[in-house]
Amino acid sequence: MIGTIMNTYIRSSGFCRSLYAYGPQRSPHGSRKQPLSIGPALAARLRKKICPLCSMFLLSYLLSLRIVITNTEHTPIRCSTSLVCCRIPPFHPGAILILSQRDSRLSYSLMINRLGDCKCALIIAHPGHELRVHHWLETTKPVVLVLTDGSGSSQHSRLQSTTHLLQRAGARAGAIYGLFSDAEMYMALMNQEFAVFLELLERTANLLAQEEIDLVAGDAIEGYNPSHDICRYLINAALELVLRKTGRRIRNYDFPVVGSPRRQPGAGRAAPVEICLDDPAWQRKLEASEEYPELAAEVEKTLATLGQQALREECLYPVDAMADRAVHPDIPFYERHGEKRCQEGVYKNVIRYRQHVRPIAEALWHHAIGYWA
């Protein structure tokens, strides 16, 4: 019934000509189609012809037809005080639309998947990182791979808390789930145990291929923790290995694990997928954080320093694997922190980027690209 009404309205209001003028975009994957994009002119027409409440129903219907509102620069379009459209990078498998009517305090967000059965995976170094993308997690329900148990120096695993969180969100743990303690991961890095990491690479690639994963999100390279950075190098190599083995190209996204979910804009960086949480989603994320006792102090510190907005936004950035391979000239935080802890007598050795992390990263990448060599 709603579809019939909307079709009639679209034809009678001249929307039909505008919609078909843009035409569906073909996906690189063959028969799948990208969402049809409505430009700023048509978005403005929505503002003039439809009341805010009706526009919500119409836009929801358009979304069901794989139509989204964006512009060529993939920046927010503000059609009126009651309608805000979020950034949508090109060829992203989902469309994110934020609608809000401030006067009536009505707001909600829609994140939909319109490219067939898009299967997602989340790959993180430590349990708890999933909180950074909690709404994306509960929306896409990915298979989750966790490299370590997050025990740190306390020797207390955080996996149980993450397992509980995944169950509540409807996601599931994968076959790689807390394979190493933090101490074992750091020891493997210090001892340059290439075989351990290359075996992990093969297992990760095989799992992604078997699961027919379309999109992977995971830790970003930040120089904060060597395990975080190794996780990103592993993801990039695994996706390259899957491509060379099967011809399957998996979309690759990362997200900041430390500090603000937003990065400083830089030359050549692609626009992120920005997810702005509505009140119910924010409340669920806050409850999940409160039910994660091992991270209570970190969550409290984040809220105190960055404010609630830091947890109300989730940003997924398209990854350039070759840019990630670039040599980092600055000394990373984990080196400086390690040196301090050594002076305090807590650590015996310091994990260094050039001596320990980069050789493993290069070994992973060369193993992936050398598959057909």
Image (cartoon, grey):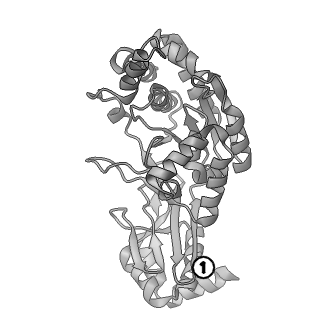
Task: State whether residue 326 is above or below residue 263.
Answer: above
Task: State whether residue 315 is above or below residue 50.
Answer: above
Among all residues in the image, which is located at the extreme front? 344
Task: State whether residue 31 is above or below residue 104.
Answer: above
Quarter of the image where one finds residue 339: top left
Side of 196 where 222 appears, left or right: left
Quarter of the image where one finds residue 1: bottom right
As helix, strand or loop, the secondary structure at mark 1 comes to: helix
In depth, the one of 301 and 47 nearer the eye is 301
Q: How many marks?
A: 1
Side of 371 where 292 appears, left or right: right
Q: State the image coordinates of residue 244 (x, y, percent, origin top left).
A: 47, 28
Q: Label 1 crowding class (10 Å Cα cut-off): few <14, some 14-19, many 20+?
A: few
Side of 345 where 145 appears, left or right: right
Task: State whether residue 100 is above or below residue 353.
Answer: below
In depth, the one of 297 and 322 nearer the eye is 297
x 73%, y 42%: residue: 164
- Give the labeled residue for mark 1: 57
Q: State the image coordinates of residue 70 (x, y, percent, origin top left).
A: 41, 67
Q: State the image coordinates of residue 152 (x, y, percent, origin top left).
A: 57, 25
x 56%, y 17%: residue: 183
Amino acid type, mark 1: Phe
